[in-house]
Every structure is written in structure tokens, then in C-alpha cells.
Amino acid sequence: KQEVTQIPAALSVPEGENLVLNCSFTDSAIYNLQWFRQDPGKGLTSLLLIQSSQREQTSGRLNASLDKSSGRSTLYIAASQPGDSATYLCAVTYTGGFKTIFGAGTRLFVKA
Amino acid sequence: DVKVTQSSRYLVKRTGEKVFLECVQDMDHENMFWYRQDPGLGLRLIYFSYDVKMKEKGDIPEGYSVSREKKERFSLILESASTNQTSMYLCASSLLFPGVKGETQYFGPGTRLLVL
């Protein structure tokens, strides 16, 4: 069964700290892995998309890595800010049916 | 910018009512999706459509139906609402099919449905 798991479910850090969010997935037959941000009561916004042939993507203070062989991805946030407080979701699109499976998310709170 | 709008942000309905959730996208996207989001379960696909009048079941289609009469509009219908359908419903659209290089889905703000 194809599953996407995110750990931890919630995280609270002081402002300025560097942090890592984790995503693990079963089955390495993937097209891509994507990280989304969701603010309370809102829809999802795409942050980074990593194709299966890539190892990482960067955007500003965000860096996402992909290790297909181990079924893991990390989202690194540098110098966290209170505005980074949100839920971060990992989504994997698998081959064979073009199915996208979402993790349950990590709720991040950055304290000022 | 792609814009995906949903007809209601909050909705309260009674058990047994027929419920319509509307989604409209303004970027001429081929594909549209309906998900529900529940705490601890992530997003689960209910139905998707890759063309007008075309639909495919997702992982949890039971109790739901959909309609796509125009390219820009995708409706989710709860034929007889039940309390276990209380959830956050998210609509999304994409130009190309998931998995095509660089393709992403664009999400609406969601409709929080409470069935009493």
C-alpha cells in the first residue's frame, strides 16, 4: 500500500532556529514529491517540487531533499520566522495511475 | 495567477440533506479534483475529472457524486449528507496530469462542512 508519513505531527521552535521536517514514503516508483504549506482554514500553496531524477530543490530559506532509495524527503527551513507558522504537507505522485498521496502534515509554530 | 474559488467557506447542513459544493477555476485547466481533509488523515481524493463530462473515482467516492458540465466548474454532490461527511473539502485544478514534469495542483480555500 502506498503511504506517506510525516514526523513530527507538531513542532514548536523559537524564532531564528533552523529546523527540519521529515517525510517518508513507501514505494520508490514516484514521479515527484512536493511540499505544500497550509495556513489555518485555507487551501494549500505549493512550496517546492522535486522530480524523481532530482536530489534537492531550493527556494529562499527553504531547501527540500529527496532520497528515493530510502523513501525519505526533508524540508529544511533556515532562520525560522513567526510567519513560517503553518502546516506543512508532503505529497508524493506515484507512477502507474498518476496517484498523488498526501501526508497528514506537520503543524509548525514559530515563537517570537 | 491561477485562481480556484469555492462557493462557500463554511456550511452547516442537516443529516439527509442534498449538498452541493461548487468549485470554479479561471485558468482553463483540464483537470479538477475534489479532496476531503480530516485531522491525522491528510487529504484523500474523492473524485477527479480530466475533461468536461468525464469523471473518475478517487479513493473514497462512496456517498458522493460529481458533475462537470463546463470546463471551469466542478461540483461535488453529497446525495444524502451524513454526520461522517463532516470535513474540510478542498478543490484543486491542474493544467496537466499529476506526474507530468513540473506539474502542480492549485488549491481553493476549502469549504468546512458541518453535518448535524
Image (cartoon, coloured by chain):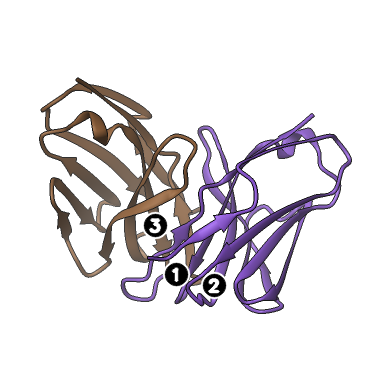
Tag 3, which chain? Answer: A
Q: Please name whichever residue, B27 or B113, is drawn nearer the observer in this view of the structure.
A: B27
Instruction: Give percent across and percent down for residue B63.
Output: 79, 50
User: Mark 2 or mark 1, which has the lower sequence index?
Assistant: 2
User: Mark 3: which amino acid?
Assistant: Val
Mark 3 vs mark 1, CA separation in Å: 10 Å
Which quadrant of the view contains residue A18? top left
Provide residue A99's location: percent of width, then percent of height: 50, 64
Residue at mark 1: B98
Residue A23, quarter of picture:
top left
Specify the amino acid type for callout 2: Asn
- The answer to whether tags 2 and 3 share a subunit is no
Secondary structure at badge 2 equals: strand
Marks 2,1: beta carbons within 8 A = yes
Chain A shade in the render: brown
A53, above or below A71, in the image: below
Q: Which residue is mark 2?
A: B31
Q: Quadrant of the C terminus of chain A?
A: top left
Q: Chain of mark 1?
A: B
Q: Is residue A67 left or right of residue B36?
A: left
Q: Which residue is mark 3?
A: A92
Helix, strand or loop at disc 1? loop
The subunit letter for the residue under badge 2 reads: B
The label nearer to you, 2 versus 1, is 2
- Label 3 sits on a secondary structure element that is strand
Q: Colour of chain B?
A: purple
Residue A27 in which image quadrant: bottom left
B97 vs B81, left or right, is left
